[in-house]
């Protein structure tokens, strides 16, 4: 039995060793095919500037003109390289080793998100190798603080003017950078607010194109500021248009059209409660003989401490100017209604036999003009027997007017 086992082990030893060797080689080949060496490009890795204080101690400031980020080519096993991103690397540049051209080499390594074993299997090649800086004397300037709000306050409310404290801050840094900075900006979220807002928020520098200026070498006198924003209730009121002056001779104002006819206003409670309308009183029709169109800025028409709460900034006004004419109609005294008579007296119009009434209006309105539409009448209230001069009254309108005064003689006697 023992001899049989020995035979199984030692018979054809060479072939068995060859089989083991071939199996190992095959395993090695398969493993290398599955985890082959590949390369991958990774972009925009931020470069950390080291020892910049060396420049600051010498009275200067620096601005990175090239090399704020670095792109690299990574080579290594597929299992390691495929999942790599910019966040797996740390790039640095030592500003204490600047060349005569103010350049220094970028060094890129993996960070602690990659194990040391995997890190050793990688070859990292920067595609842009240098950081270049300009060195200038430090400059400073004051810039205004602007408050930007996001979101919408609760319905029926509106924001007053934001008040930042401080409203100006000082920025320091290279002149080449400061020349592009126009303001500091603070952002406040006002979503669903219905009470006055007071918050401490961070501020950032903004250039002339509205972009954030994010530079390590720019310092602000205040990194955070206090922002106070009043929150008011709103109110919808009508707009009233009043014209000033008179159109050219022979013309008149027929219609005044404007949009919008109402606006939403806001302000302090007591001030807001006193406002019932917004009047626009600066539409001049002096010597006009044709339609006048104008856009009126609402801000110029608001009372103190009152603000527009919607998007309306202007009122579009159109004043129709049309030709007017004067027409003469004949009025017989018998057509004049006599009112407030005393039942104990008799009344008779003795003169004149007829009246020529001059009516002024727009041509279209004159088409339906009649004595009945003018409703002529006179009051004899409290008049005693005798002869009296009594004024005739008429129904007038904005479009039909009677400028002259007309009287008749009435004789009153006892019955």
Image: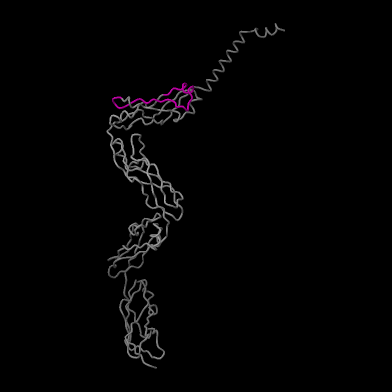
Looking at the image, the residue that sits furthest to the top is 3
Residue 116 belongs to the span the image colors magenta: yes
Q: To which quarter of the image does residue 177 belong?
A: top left
- The answer to whether residue 167 is left or right of residue 75 is left
Which region of the structure is painted magenta? 99-124
Residue drawn at (41%, 89%) of the image: 343
Give the quarter of the figure containing the N terminus: top right
Residue 394: x %, y % from top left:
36, 78
* The one of 180 and 9 positioned closer to us in this rendering: 180
Q: To which quarter of the image does residue 298 belong?
A: bottom left
- The answer to whether residue 8 is left or right of residue 404 is right
* The one of 391 and 226 positioned closer to us in this rendering: 226
Residue 96 in the image: above or below residue 339: above
What colouring style does the render use? one colour
Residue 14: x %, y % from top left:
61, 8
Residue 122 belongs to the span the image colors magenta: yes
Residue 390 in the image: above or below residue 284: below
Residue 72: x %, y % from top left:
41, 27
Residue 39: x %, y % from top left:
46, 25
- What number of labels is visible? 0
- The answer to whether residue 194 is left or right of residue 388 is right
Residue 194 in the image: above or below residue 292: above
Give the quarter of the figure containing the C terminus: bottom left
* The one of 294 and 186 positioned closer to us in this rendering: 186
Looking at the image, the residue that sits furthest to the right is 1
């Amino acid at each position: 039995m023992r001899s049989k086992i020995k035979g199984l082990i030692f018979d054809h030893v060479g072939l068995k060793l060859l089989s083991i060797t071939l199996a190992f080689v095959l395993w090695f080949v398969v493993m290398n095919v599955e985890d082959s060496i590949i390369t991958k490009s990774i972009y925009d890795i931020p470069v950390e500037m080291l020892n910049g204080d060396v420049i600051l101690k010498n009275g200067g400031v620096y601005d990175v003109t090239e090399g704020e980020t670095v792109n690299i080519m990574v080579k290594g096993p597929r299992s390691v390289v495929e999942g790599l991103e910019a966040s797996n690397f740390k790039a640095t540049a030592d500003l204490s080793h600047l060349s005569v051209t103010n350049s220094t080499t970028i060094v890129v390594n993996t960070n602690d998100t990659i194990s040391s074993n995997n890190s050793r299997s990688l070859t990292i090649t920067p595609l842009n190798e240098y950081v270049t800086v300009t060195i200038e004397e430090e400059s400073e300037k004051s810039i205004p603080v602007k408050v930007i709000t996001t979101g919408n306050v609760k319905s029926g409310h509106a924001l007053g003017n934001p008040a930042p404290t401080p409203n100006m801050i000082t920025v320091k840094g290279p002149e080449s950078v400061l020349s592009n900075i126009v303001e500091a900006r603070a952002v406040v979220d006002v979503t669903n607010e219905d009470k006055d807002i007071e918050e401490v928020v961070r501020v950032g520098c903004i250039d002339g194109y509205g972009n954030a200026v994010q530079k390590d070498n720019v310092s602000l006198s205040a990194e955070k500021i206090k922002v106070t924003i009043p929150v008011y209730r709103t109110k919808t009121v009508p707009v009233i248009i009043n014209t000033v002056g008179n159109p050219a001779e022979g013309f008149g104002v027929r219609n005044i059209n404007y949009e919008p006819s109402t606006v939403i206003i806001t302000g302090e409670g007591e001030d807001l409660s006193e406002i019932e309308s917004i009047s626009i009183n600066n539409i001049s029709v002096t010597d006009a003989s044709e339609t006048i169109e104008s856009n009126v800025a609402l801000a110029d028409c608001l009372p103190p401490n009152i603000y527009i709460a919607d998007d309306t900034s202007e009122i579009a006004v159109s004043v129709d100017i049309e030709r007017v004419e004067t027409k003469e109609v004949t009025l017989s005294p018998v057509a004049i209604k006599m009112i407030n008579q005393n039942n104990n007296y008799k009344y008779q119009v003795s003169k004149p036999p007829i009246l020529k009434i001059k009516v002024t209006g727009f041509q279209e309105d004159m088409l339906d003009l009649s004595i009945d539409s003018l409703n002529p009448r006179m009051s004899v209230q409290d008049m005693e027997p005798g002869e009296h001069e009594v004024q005739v009254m008429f129904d007038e309108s904005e479009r039909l007017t009677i400028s002259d005064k007309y009287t008749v003689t009435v004789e009153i006697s006892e019955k």
